[in-house]
Image (tube, rainbow, N blue to C red):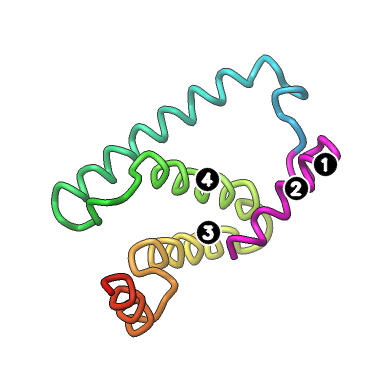
Amino acid sequence: MVNTDGAGEERVDSDGRDPVFGNHQLILPEWADRLEELRAVGRTNLLEIVRLGVRQGIFRPDLEMDEVAEIIEDVAIATHVFHSRGENKQERLARRVRVAIDLLMHGIRTPEAAAAKAEVSRV
């Protein structure tokens, strides 16, 4: 999965275009700063939720909290951009949110695989 993400970046870097969104700052330059301000507000709220979860012992204390908040924000934005229109949008959005929260809170690995990795890491 890590390697597949880099392929998209290489595509953007090689031809100077983003294959999905283009360069919003070039298309709507007057909105670029405002968009970044809004994203910063969203990240601040998410970061506080992550910090609170760490303080309460719900989330791991070794998380890179700023990155986690930004990743959660990216998932929320992508969900809105790609899944907020068309037929059954409310049902699709509800399902996506449910699955995203489950994935975030429980991971993609089975408990056995996670335990095996933890065991290997200790050795």
Upstream in sequence: badge 3 or badge 1: 1
Q: Amino acid at mark 4?
A: Asp
Q: Circle 3 sits in a helix, a strand or a loop, which is it? A: helix
In the rendered view of the protein, which quadrant contains the N terminus? bottom right
Q: Circle 4 sits in a helix, a strand or a loop, which is it? A: helix
Name the residue beneath numbered marker 2. Answer: 10
Q: Circle 2 sits in a helix, a strand or a loop, which is it? A: helix
Mark 4 vs mark 2, CA separation in Å = 19 Å
Q: Where is residue 65? Give x, y as percent.
A: 33, 43
- The range drawn in magenta is 1-21
Q: Amino acid at mark 1?
A: Ser
Question: Callout 2: few (<14), some (14-19), or many (20+) C-alpha neighbours within 10 Å?
Answer: few
Name the residue beneath numbered marker 4. Answer: 74
- Of tags 3 and 4, the one toward the viewer is 4
Residue 20 is inside the magenta segment: yes
Name the residue beneath numbered marker 1. Answer: 14
Name the residue beneath numbered marker 3. Answer: 93
Give me the residue at 56% from left, 52% from top. Answer: 79
| Tag 1 near tag 2, CB within 8 Å | yes
- Of tags 2 and 3, the one toward the viewer is 2
Mark 3 vs mark 4, CA separation in Å = 15 Å
Give me the residue at 72% from left, 21% from top. Answer: 28
| Tag 3 near tag 1, CB within 8 Å | no
Q: Where is residue 92? Give x, y as percent.
A: 56, 64
Q: Amino acid at mark 2?
A: Glu
Q: Circle 1 sits in a helix, a strand or a loop, which is it? A: helix
> Image height check: is 65 above or below 115?
above
Left or right: where 87 falls relative to 111: right
Outermost residue on the right side: it is: 15
